[in-house]
Amino acid sequence: MRYSVFLEPVDEPDFKGYYYAHIPALDLTTHGQGIEGALSAAQDLVEAWIAEKRAHGEAVPIEQKSLIAQIEVADALLRP
């Protein structure tokens, strides 16, 4: 089974070089140092999360299809 992971850099001074890893199908987020660290943290989190769900007899969502899109917002809207 595969789950999509959306990565984005953490924008905090104490976490330079870290990335957030979002797993939308499971509504989970973690972080790690660098892309590989974030993906490794995501793998660990998903496996632990699935084990917990199974231990309680709960269903685990299966990702059907993943799409990533972007929208553009005018720069003028972002200025103070």
Image (cartoon, rainbow, N blue to C red):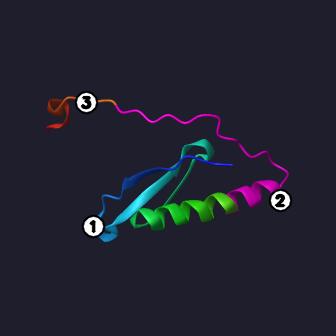
State which quadrant residue 49 falls in.
bottom right
Q: Residues within 10 Å of mark 2 (few under 14, many from 20)?
A: few
Mark earlier in primary sequence (3, 2): 2
The residue under the point 48% across, 55% down is 21
Q: Main secondary structure of the magenta part?
A: loop
**3D distance between C-alphas at marks 3 and 2:** 44 Å
Location of residue 56 in the rendering, given as x and y in whole percent from the top left corner: 83, 55
Look at label 3 and name its amino acid. Val
Tell me the residue that label 3 is attached to: 73
Indicate left or right for 5 with 25 as reference. Answer: left
- 57 within the magenta span: yes
- Residue drawn at x 60%, y 42% as measured from the top left: 25
Residue at 54 percent across and 66 percent down: it is: 40
Circle nearer the viewer, 1 or 3: 3
Mark number, residue 68: none
Residue located 34% across and 68% down the image: 15
| Left or right relative to 63: residue 53 | right
Label 3: which secondary element = loop
